[in-house]
Amino acid sequence: MSDASLPLQAEDLEPARAARHVSGESRLVQWSLVAISLAFLCLFLFLPLITVFVEASARGWQAYREAILEPDALAAIRLTLLVAAIAVPINIVIGIAAAWAIAKFEFRGKSLLTSFIDLPFSVSPVISGLVFVLLFGAQGYFGLWLKAHDIQIVFALPGIVLATIFVTFPFVARELIPHMQSLGSAEEETALTLGASPWRTFLTVTLPNVKWSLFYGVLLCNARAMGEFGAVAVVSGKIRGLTNTMPLHVEILYNEYMGAAAFAVASLLAGLALVTLALKTLLEWHFADAIAASRRH
């Protein structure tokens, strides 16, 4: 075989190489996987989402407006936003503290703390709500003491907030822990060596380095807080106009055969989710270089 034939063989192999990704799969396999993924998304995500908006507008704008502006619906909207406004900041503070402790320090019980952070993922939301009822309900462990001091937790705002905090807690911490661990502690140690206080080190070094992971965690936490059903359903008592959040209000309307009104309120929840997704996408597009640099770091 002559040496002149070698470049020709390399050129012959080039189209085959171009037709494959690093994984070595052919274009047929690649496009098949893409088609399966798109079909799954259309069937289980896009189609139900479109159905919600179609059903919500089936009886016209006036009926849609009346369903949204109905007093019980407005109360559910206000309560949902209030619960999210309370639960998300609390989870931000606790999530950052837990992630910082796990990623930056070595201490006894570290693996146990990590397991506890994942606990809400493995416990049914209904079970978590029942636990709060058993603790703070009228017949619960602290029920008599709470009643004596005129404090109501279950079937009131505090119980809904507690249940929401529990089910949404892991999202912020779980986004921050691997990022903080990958960054290490070198920059913080340098800042401390140069005379910066621990608080200033956190604000000027740690927090800017993990801001995008924190942002993603907050988005997930907020979306789950507004859409939580199981735990809230147990601790709220489903009192119309008082302890009904938007998901609970949707269920009540649907059970009362008020389908158009139920889909109208559901479309508002879906719209909030889409706004959250659009905000995330917009910021990713606008700050793509900064995000990529943060992840490479």
Image (spheres, helix red, strand yellow):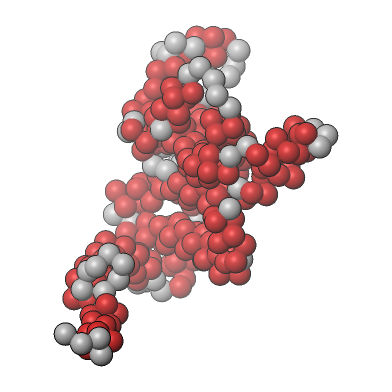
Vertical side of 189 occupied by 153: above or below: above
- Residue 87 visible: no
Which corner quadrant of the image does residue 258 belong to? Answer: bottom left
Relative to 290, 248 lies left or right: left
Residue 34, given in percent of the width and then of the height, sits at 26, 70
Q: Residue at x 31, y 67 (%)?
A: 22
Q: Residue at x 47, y 37 (%)?
A: 170
Relative to 79, 224 lies left or right: left
Return the residue nearer the eye: 182 or 85. Answer: 182
Return the residue nearer the eye: 274 or 254. Answer: 274
Q: What is the residue that sits farthest to the front in this orientation? A: 2
Vertical side of 26 occupied by 171: above or below: above
Vertical side of 245 occupied by 109: above or below: above
Residue 15, given in percent of the width and then of the height, sits at 26, 84
Relative to 93, 47 lies left or right: left
Number of marks: 0
Return the residue nearer the eye: 99 or 277. Answer: 99
